[in-house]
Image: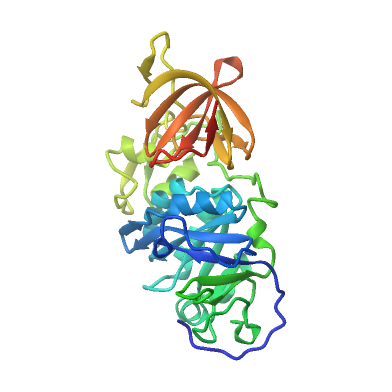
Amino acid sequence: MAGVSTVTVNAARGDRGTDQSEYQGQYGRFGYGDETFQFSQIGGYYNGSFVPHWTYGSQVQNARSRGLHAHTYIYSQFSGRWQADQMLNYYLPRIQTPKGSIVALDVESGNPDTDSVLYALQRIKDCGYTPVLYGYKNFLVNHLNLQYISTQYPLWLAEYPDYSVRRFPNYGFFPSFNNVAIFQFTSTYVAGGLDGDVDLTGITDNGYTKNINPQVKQPAQPSPKSNQADTYTVKPGDSWWSIANAHGVNMYNLAAINGRSINSTIYPGQVLKLTSNTTSHRAVQPKSNSSNSWTDSLGDLWHHESGTFISNSWINIRWGAKTTSSRIGMIKPGDAIKYDAWSRHNGYVWVRQPRSNGQYGYLAVRDSNNQPFGYFK
């Protein structure tokens, strides 16, 4: 915990919410019933080690069923762009809160550096989420150029006057700084312990009443008039993601055609292959779907089934049945889509939506525990 300060500020008073992790259990803990948002920890990254939280999905679904604006945070102990990529390559595809919602980096330990923190926040933004940096002011100021970061991205800072149960913030202990959007004012919001937060700017509306369908930065597509090189020589500071983004290719396929994975290290001077068939995870359909089941070009088993799915949350529709596939758009709670097939793979149950001109869209309708994101008829 950061040192106690006595700076008095006239901070705007807004909606209250909580942030929770696996310590609060499968469905999280309730506050007082007048909260409007909840952050759930998707997991942690500890200099190369991953500790995903099994409670994340159920906490998000429970928060949303109660009408709360659900957001995500990652415990982030990393340094260097390579570790930032490794962390985000793992967690970004697993986020279950809607595009536009907050994805916060919880940076409160280790040896972070300004460049990789800025790089990670930009990657979150490029994926269509609202990036926020969380931490204790003293730690962040002592390890990062927090003043510069705050000119680029909003902050979520923590400061507690004591460990008494506290339902409302004491602004006499506000960690005064530029661009503080969220104030974590206690770790004992209720008896037994629970972090309490106040939204100072309305940022927790993002993804719900604001930025519902934000512009997602797509990789630059190579010009059809140019002759794209077949290879690329790695330069200092490069990563799988940055190379893929610069050349308009999919980073997973880029690694695969080089016989590597995105978690492997690349070094300056290495030569990587680039090919034109790595731009999509769109599944190529078999010529005939007359049988009840079939395997598509990506090796996933599909089953014919005609039905209607009604969503109870925001869900991406994609050109392929992968979380890395390009987005077509989103459906909102209450929307109904017709589907003609389903498949269980990569931690989700997917359904296939027939579209115009013989094309298909795909969306995840159940999580790894078979819990639906809506209902079927």
Left/right placement of residue 12 relative to residue 23 reads: right
Residue 136 visible at all: yes
Q: Position of residue 322 (x, y in %)?
A: 44, 35
Residue 325: x and y, percent? Answer: 48, 35
- Above or below, 231 against 42 in this view is above
Q: Is residue 267 above or below residue 199?
A: above
* Quadrant of residue 213 within the rendered picture: top right
Q: Nearer the viewer, residue 258 or 311?
A: 311
Image position, residue 171 (x, y; %): 65, 83
Q: Residue at x 49, y 35 (%)?
A: 365
Residue 127 is situated, as x and y percent measured from the top left of the image, at 54, 48
Query: Who is closer to the viewer here, 125 or 232?
Result: 125
Image position of 277 with respect to 184: above or below = above
Q: How is the image coloured?
A: rainbow
Give left or right: position of 49 versus 291.
Answer: left
Q: Nearer the viewer, residue 249 or 131?
A: 131
In depth, the one of 348 and 156 nearer the eye is 348
Is 307 rendered above or below residue 152?
Answer: above
* Quarter-of-image position of residue 338: top right
Residue in the image at 64% along x and 33% along y: 335
Q: How many marks?
A: 0
Q: Quadrant for the C terminus, please.
A: top right
Task: Residue at 53% x, 21% y: name it.
Answer: 307
375 sits left or right of 43 in the view: right
Q: Locate the N terminus and report the quarter of the image it occupies.
A: bottom left
